[in-house]
Image (cartoon, rainbow, N blue to C red):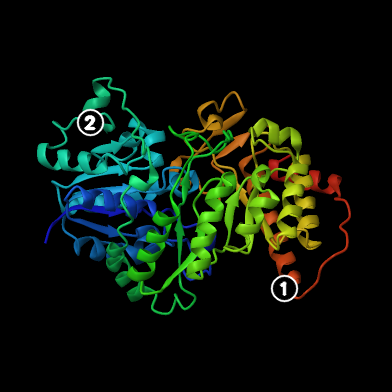
Amino acid sequence: MTLDVLVISPFRRPTFRKAISERYPVREPWDSPPLIVAGGLEQRGLTVGYLALQNLFDSWEESRDLSRLREILMDVPTRMVLFTSDYFIPSRSTATLFGIRVVSKQMRAAHAEVIIGVAGRLATTAGPHLLDQVPECDFLVHGEPESVVGDIAAELLEKGVAEARHPSLVTRASTTDGQRPHPATTATLDETPLPAWHLLDRSLHWWDKHEPTSDTAGIPFSLRTSAGCRFRCRFCAGVPNWLNYRTKSAARVAAEIDGLVEATQGRAQFSFLEDEIFTRDLTHVEAISAVCVERGIRFDGVYTHSSLLTSEVAQPLARMTGRVFLGLDNPDDAILKEMRKGQRFDTVLTAIETARAAGLGTHLEWIIGSPSDTVDSLAASLNLITSLYSTGVVESINTYVYCPHPGTEYAERAETYGIRIIDGFEDMQESGGYPTYETKHLTQQQIFVAYLMSQLTIAEIARDRDRGIVQSAVGSSSRGELHRLFDKLRGQ
């Protein structure tokens, strides 16, 4: 049977870890947003399929994987292909341009009449530029796609790309006519379709065929219980409705959890919540925590902001997870202010103590190479990472390469902030990616080496922590030597 629409979560370039080995023990969670989009298409009466290519090809090597990709795609005849990823999280969207390009070429070569589109954050922030980047792409959905994607797809299939008109539809014709798309908005999250978990069967079949022994600990899945944020960080915010904070009811979240457990026959491992700031609403935290306790579910971690982790919130939170994820991003208050992060370093320390009092561990996330970073601030970060982690103040730390994601203030006003963007969207990977830019203070090479230094530091401390070694104190850094090393990287 030929489907009306095949929804695809596209893959990215492999990071250096996965380039070293396709079996490198790091796995991406399977995300829910593409399946909610699929649910919206089914709700409109369309026949729909789904492929989690983000998870099936996380270590892409054309000579090895192209034949398998073709086999997977040819197994699903379809009239339309829709690539989609999370609408809010840039790290799960920008670099998917790589997979969109690869798959679009294969689909168009095999089926000249297939209609190809993109929805999600990249489609919204890159806009018509994305149509230039992907010649095979016929349309984009602007804004939150769930509430409009069914109508848009049905109209495109009925009338064709040239004749279709929708306020949130972007085509080459609409951009030529100068039409400004209206961002689609999901007013109430409970009114969005349930994720079409039953469509996971095809992807799980290919997963089992290629990774027959890889899910002994369960397959990691992420869920979203709220949408939107109250902060406008210059490296993160950048889509319409970013500040429009909304929550799902406990009943809705329970239905999503139950549906996933049933569809995967208990294979799903609940990895983390996709929510930007889960702990903003105490009533919501208490309700979702009760759902998790009732079902015996504990997430690996929950993201929040340091200013939103109170003792009242921490208590119910501790019943559904063992740790909180906090974006420290930089320990320098001046840099945090310039980022518009909405916190100070002491705010983060207070949140860590609040978490500890409730029996929660803390995971810190750190940006390496932000526009205001210098060699001195990198040295301070590396020393503080060592201090906080090796002394047991926090349970874990991870570092990320700053990425100038489209739509963010840093990227849209790059010259103002001293950023020179060198490489394209498909290279913008925060975890394990090579910097796609340089700043007035740091070169690409300096930033990447600082990132690798941070990863090495974290790995070696983790090894000691696993052996029960906890330091009582950490000394100061040798700034002169670090300057000498970074000067060599600059070529001086």
Label 2: how many residues lie within 10 Å, few (<14), some (14-19) or many (20+)?
A: some
Which one is nearer the viewer's eye here, 201 or 406?
201
Mark 1 or mark 2: name the one nearer the start of the chain: 2
Residue 30 horizontal side relative to residue 200, left or right: right
Q: Is residue 288 left or right of residue 41?
A: right
Image quadrant in which the N terminus is located: bottom left
Task: Give the residue at x 26% y 42%.
Answer: 149
- Direction from residue 170 to residue 481 in the image, left or right: right
Of 332 and 131, which appears nearest the observer?
332
Q: Position of residue 261 (x, y in %)?
A: 39, 69
| Residue 117 percent coordinates (x, y) | 26, 43
Residue at 79% over, 62% down = 390
Q: Which of the two residues, 25 or 22, is positioned nearer the viewer here? A: 25
Is residue 172 in view from this perspective? yes
The reply to whether residue 60 is in sight is no
Crowd class of label 1 (few under 14; some 14 to 19; many from 20; radius 10 Å): few
State the image coordinates of residue 59 (x, y, percent, origin top left): 44, 62
Using the numbered discs, state the Cα–Cα distance from disc 1 to disc 2 in whole angstroms: 56 Å
Residue corresponding to mark 2: 166
Q: Nearer the viewer, mark 1 or mark 2?
A: 2
Label 1–label 2 contact, CB within 8 A: no
- 105 shown above or below 215: above
In the picture, the disc for residue 113 is: none
- Above or below 409: residue 7: below
Query: Amino acid type of disc 2?
Result: His
Left or right, residue 356 beside residue 108: right
Specify the quadrant of the image occupied by residue 475.
Answer: bottom right
What amino acid does circle 1 point to? Answer: Asp
Q: Secondary structure at mark 2?
A: loop
Residue in the picture at 60% in, 48% down: 304
- Residue 466's label in the rendered image is 1
305 vs 359, nearest the viewer: 359
